[in-house]
Image (spheres, coloured by chain):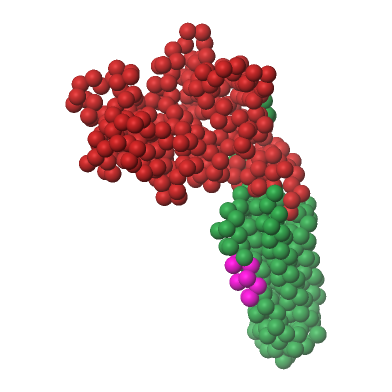
């Protein structure tokens, strides 16, 4: 029994989940900065949270690489470490996307918004929920929960389309709103990208637990026969 | 992280799909093996395909070496040992009454854990099997076979100038490759390797592994190894044995990334016991 190795894997998972918690906070704050017109919230993400996410990305990669080299993991451990490296990369990108929104906030709140914030907070709540579920699925090896994340992604895409349509309509009717409408479209675009990364994380959880690659609808079984013992 | 249970998806993956029969060079059918009253193999059935490297893994005492030795009847001489079942070599049962064991061993060569060169010269070690089997009788022909075998074993460049030196003066890795050359000289179809690199350093081990990969162009190789990374590096398919039973057999890449059975998962991740 490789207890020490097992403990190191648990520790690594905790670090990744902690990093995910920071990403959740970053998303929450960037939306609060926008809805409450409070640039200090955006500043907290840019100055405090995102640099910590970046430092964690490096730490998680180093830990994973060390375990690959020293423990030569196989089977479920190999799948876990491969998944962690990818989840790590996804989380870091999610932090960057939250920062994109934060950086736009000061300019956006200088004037009235092109449209009242209705769909965007709804979309942000769904995205935050996806991130939380993906991380809970990782923590609890919960494949059913991970699959829920994949389904919610379609809802987020539908909301993004709705936001795009509404704002396009605004721009066509009043060209003076183009710049402000585009800012909102970019917020929707960044949220939708964050949801895609949450989906990637959920897919990695499924791969880790079940050994099945569900990316890009790759569901075919690439397996060979293993006879029943003694058959 | 240790609460590993095979999921439904993994359990489904264990469903058998019969391989193409014509590709099988060796086929064990319902093999049982006993040392006296002690049964050490239980109803093993598996096929080894032409031109593949097939690895047998499992903890000490799981029966993998005993199984390997049933494939060329190396267990025949063990007192009180008893074999049940059949092993087909190109469709013929090697345990059929009247089967020619000498011819079997020519077709199915064996490399052991400890290199075991004879206390002769390098040349005479390779020529030994030729003499015993009455092959390559002419001097020129014999020399040609010796060179070809040493080249195939990746040893020629290191020993070409000292063919008359004692084999025991070679390094451990060279001695093991000499034993491989000796086995190749009589042109077997299949090579059985019982932990061929377990006594070698990483460089000599790497050479044996490279050699196995080159040899599989012409030979079918069955290898027993305790080194999981070695099985992962060189074999096409792997079988996992536990307590005398075959637990799982499959493509090596699959077995080491997504094994179908919990016992396999526990063994290869070191969570055994």
Magenta-tinted stretch: A54-62
The residue lying toward the viewer, choosing from B166 and A112, is B166
Give above or below for A101 relative to A153: below
Give above or below for A4 relative to A195: above
- Which residue lies at the image location 39% right of the left edge and 43% below the top edge? B173
Residue B117 inside the magenta-drawn segment: no
The residue lying toward the viewer, choosing from A169 and B92, is B92
* Position in image of residue B229 (x %, y %): 54, 47
Can you see residue B247? no
- Which residue lies at the image location 70% right of the left edge and 83% below the top edge? A48
> What colour has chain A?
green
- Which residue lies at the image location 60% right of the left edge and 71% below the top edge? A58
Can you see residue B66? yes
* Position in image of residue B257 (x %, y %): 61, 47
A100 relative position to B112: left or right: right
> Which quadrant is the C terminus of chain A positioned in?
top right
Q: Quadrant of residue A125?
A: bottom right
* Position in image of residue B56 (x %, y %): 56, 35
* Position in image of residue B184 (x %, y %): 35, 30
Q: Quadrant of residue A110?
A: bottom right
The residue lying toward the viewer, choosing from B17 and B203, is B203
The chain in red: B
Give above or below for B3 relative to B248: below
Residue A55 inside the magenta-drawn segment: yes
Residue lying farthest to the bottom in this orientation: A110
B91 relative position to B179: left or right: right
The residue lying toward the viewer, choosing from B185 and A231, is B185
- Which residue lies at the image location 44% right of the left edge and 12% below the top edge? B100
């Amino acid at each position: 029994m490789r207890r020490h190795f097992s403990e190191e894997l648990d520790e690594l998972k905790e670090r990744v989940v902690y990093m995910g918690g920071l990403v959740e906070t970053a998303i929450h704050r960037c939306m609060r900065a926008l809805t409450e017109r409070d640039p200090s919230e955006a500043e907290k993400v840019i100055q405090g949270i995102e640099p910590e996410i970046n430092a964690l990305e490096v730490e998680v990669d180093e830990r994973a690489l060390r375990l690959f080299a020293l423990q030569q993991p196989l089977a479920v451990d190999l799948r876990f470490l491969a998944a962690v490296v990818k989840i790590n990369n996804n989380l870091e990108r999610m932090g960057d996307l939250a920062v994109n929104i934060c950086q736009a906030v000061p300019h956006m709140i200088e004037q009235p918004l092109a449209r009242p914030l209705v769909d965007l907070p709804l979309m942000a709540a769904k995205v935050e929920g996806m991130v939380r579920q993906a991380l809970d699925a990782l923590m609890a090896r919960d494949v059913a929960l991970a699959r829920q994340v994949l389904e919610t992604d379609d809802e987020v895409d539908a909301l993004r389309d709705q936001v795009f349509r509404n704002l396009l309509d605004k721009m066509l009717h009043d060209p003076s709103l183009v710049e402000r409408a585009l800012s909102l479209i970019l917020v929707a675009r960044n949220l939708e990208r964050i949801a895609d990364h949450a989906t990637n994380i959920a897919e990695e959880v499924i791969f880790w637990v079940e050994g099945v690659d569900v990316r890009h609808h790759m569901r075919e079984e690439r397996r060979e026969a293993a006879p029943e013992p003694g058959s | 992280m240790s609460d590993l249970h095979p999921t439904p998806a993994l359990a489904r993956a264990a469903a058998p799909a019969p391989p193409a029969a014509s590709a099988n060079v060796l086929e064990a059918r319902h093999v049982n093996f006993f040392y006296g009253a002690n049964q050490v193999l239980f109803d093993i059935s598996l096929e080894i395909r032409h031109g593949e490297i097939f690895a047998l893994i499992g903890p000490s005492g799981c029966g993998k070496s005993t199984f390997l030795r049933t494939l060329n009847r190396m267990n025949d001489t063990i007192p009180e040992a008893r074999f049940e079942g059949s092993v087909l070599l190109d469709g013929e049962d090697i345990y059929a009454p009247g089967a020619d064991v000498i011819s079997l061993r020519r077709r199915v060569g064996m490399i052991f854990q400890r290199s075991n060169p004879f206390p002769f010269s390098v040349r005479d070690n390779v020529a030994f099997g030729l003499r015993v089997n009455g092959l390559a009788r002419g001097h020129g022909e014999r020399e040609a076979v010796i060179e070809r075998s040493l080249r195939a074993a990746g040893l020629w460049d290191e020993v070409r100038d000292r063919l008359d030196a004692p084999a025991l003066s070679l390094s451990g890795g060279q001695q093991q490759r000499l034993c491989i050359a000796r086995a190749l000289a009589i042109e077997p179809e299949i090579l059985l390797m019982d932990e061929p690199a377990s006594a070698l350093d990483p460089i000599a081990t790497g050479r044996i592994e490279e050699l196995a990969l080159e040899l599989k162009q012409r030979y079918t190789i069955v290898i027993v190894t305790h080194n999981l990374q070695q099985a992962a590096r060189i074999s096409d398919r792997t079988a996992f044995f536990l307590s005398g039973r075959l637990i799982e057999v499959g493509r090596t890449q699959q077995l080491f990334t997504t094994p179908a059975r919990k016992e396999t998962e526990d063994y290869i991740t070191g969570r055994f016991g």
